[in-house]
Image (spheres, rainbow, N blue to C red):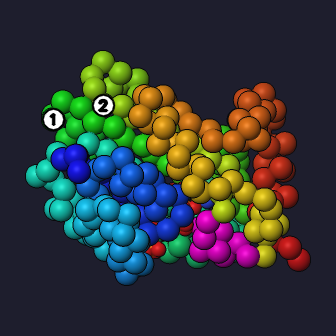
Amino acid sequence: MADTLALVTGASDGIGYELARRAVEDGHRLVICSDSDAIEEAADKLRRLGGEVETVQADLSGRRGVETLWQTVEHRKIDLFFANVGQALGHAFHEQKWRDVKRLIDLNVLQTTSMLHRVGRKMRAQGGGRILVTGSLGGFVPGPYDAVYNATKSYLDSLCYALQDEWKENDVVLTCLMPGPVETEIFDRAGMQDAPIEDAKKEDPTDVARKGYEALMKGERGAIPSLPSKVITMLAGIAPQGLMAEVHRWGARPRD
Ligand SMILES: NC(=O)c1ccc[n+]([C@@H]2O[C@H](COP(=O)([O-])OP(=O)(O)OC[C@H]3O[C@@H](n4cnc5c(N)ncnc54)[C@H](OP(=O)(O)O)[C@@H]3O)[C@@H](O)[C@H]2O)c1
């Protein structure tokens, strides 16, 4: 096994687990993190594939959780960082609990930025590294009935493109993975079981992770894994925002 370390957040399930699997298959040691003991089951599966895996169970929506994770890696060289953790939050904005809205922003924006700041500085100091941020196609589209989520992804997509520019003259590669809807637990966790998106055909998390991983290795700036998502990205650049919001509403608004 190569003496290289990959750090993956939100790795117990979904896209994060698949990214971790890719990293194991590529021979990297892993530190994987999520906020429940599901991370131990994920680690067992990855070890059965031959991976050398350490786990950190921490809630990354808070500073304490980020510090816990950071203490595990701060004195080590980090070769790959998958800033993947994120949650969504369905239903109308005014019906959501403020506590949940704040937690979403803390996780997707504040603490993800904190991790990127820490790892980015570290990689610059150590002379290089590769970072894949799981942004979203949702960052290009206003997202009625999951509004704050799309806004957080808009922030992340933008941050990625800005940091790529700042870091282009050194060896820190940053790629933004921007999938459309993917077949994972995210919609259930967001309370969107009663929205049409739940029944829609979605992208395959294994395929999404593979394309993101390959784009990172090639040093590409962005990865939009599916053709329909590429078309929506182009449309979002020319269609009125109000129209794009209506398209999103069809999928995300709870059925009456
Ligand atoms: N699925 C989609 O349609 C889609 C589309 C575009 C972008 N994305 C982005 O892809 C990323 C991964 O999403 P996914 O669909 O794979 O989600 P998922 O299947 O729901 O997995 C989420 C992962 O994040 C962990 N997690 C959630 N809250 C956490 C917290 N507060 N602290 C630490 N870990 C936490 C979960 O751990 P536990 O299981 O231990 O709770 C799990 O490992 C997110 O950034 C999401 O925004 C998803």
Please give left or right for residue 194 compared with residue 157 in the image.
right
Q: Earlier in the sequence, mark 2 or mark 1?
A: 1
User: Residue at the top extreme?
Assistant: 169
Q: What's the residue at 33%, 68% (across, down)?
A: 47
Quick one: 99 or 4, which is closer to the camera? 4
> Which image quarter: residue 252?
bottom right
Q: Would you place residue 157 above or below residue 253 in this image?
A: above
Q: Would you place residue 69 above or below residue 96 in this image?
A: above
Is any part of residue 89 visible from this angle? no
Q: SS class of the residue under badge 1?
A: helix
Label 1 sits on residue: 126
Q: Cβ of disc 2 within 8 Å of ligand 1?
A: no
Q: Would you place residue 192 above or below residue 37 in this image?
A: above
User: Residue at the left extreme?
Assistant: 75
Q: Which residues are magenta?
A: 184-193
Q: SS class of the residue under badge 2?
A: strand
Q: What's the residue at 25%, 62% (across, down)?
A: 52
Q: Amino acid at mark 1?
A: Gln
Give the mark count: 2
Please give left or right for residue 14 compared with residue 131 in the image.
right
> Which image quarter: residue 101?
bottom right
Residue 141 locus on image (x, y percent): 70, 44
Q: Are marks 2 and 1 in contact (CB under 8 Å)?
A: no
Residue 79 locus on image (x, y percent): 26, 42
Quick one: 82 or 28, which is closer to the camera? 28
What number is the disc on residue 172?
2
Residue 41 lies in the magenta-colored region: no
